[in-house]
Image (cartoon, rainbow, N blue to C red):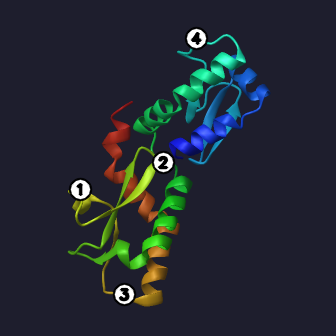
Amino acid sequence: MTHADLKHQLQQLEEDIWQAILDGSSLYLHDDQSLVLHAGSHPDTIITLANISAHDISALRAHILAHSDTLLDDYYCTHPLTKIGFERQVVALIAQYGAAAFAAVYGSVPERTLFVELGEVIAESADSPRYRYGAYCELEDELLGEALEQFVAGWVSHGEAYELYISMNACRYGCLA
């Protein structure tokens, strides 16, 4: 979810949702795409009344909207993307740049590698200093055309891309607990 997406979804919330938050419910981020009301605590809670001194809906709404960027940044500092959220963004990047941009034979590097930065999957090019440390699909043998596209699509859909992302960031999220 981007800052703009969060702000838009917050602006669309009905009065009864804001009231429920005042009454102790929380909003959690479902699959890095939508806000869902939960009657208490949830592992992916992004908004709760804790640490907010608002006593009415308008004050709560104003406070949350004013701090939405920080809330999202703080959330993604301690929460990895969900598998669905990660894969949705990777598929969009593959559609934009092509499968070949994210695949290379073992021992070489592709045109682009994947990084996650505050909830956004980024396709880094070779001119980025961190490019060599990004995630990409490693091939045992050279593949071309449809075979390459299918292999990279399988790398994403079978969860291998997500597992690579999680393994590369194990300490980032695991050491925070």
| Comes first in the chain, label 2 or label 1 | 2
Tell me where residue 176 sits by quadrant. top left
Query: Which residue is the site of mark 2?
Result: 81
- Dot 2: element: loop
- The disc at residue 130 is 1
For the point 77% across and 32% down, the residue is 14
Residue at left offset 54%, top offset 53%: 85
- At label 4, which amino acid type do we have? Ser
Element under label 4? loop
Q: Residue at x 68, y 38 (%)?
A: 36
Distance between the Cα atoms at labels 3 and 4? 58 Å
Mark with earlier residue (3, 4): 4
Question: Residue placed at 30% from the left, 59% from the top?
Answer: 134
Q: Are marks 4 and 2 in contact (CB under 8 Å)?
A: no
Tags 2 and 1 touching, CB below 8 Å: no
Q: Between marks 4 and 1, how big is the CA–CA gap?
A: 41 Å
Image side of residue 143 versus residue 158, left or right: left
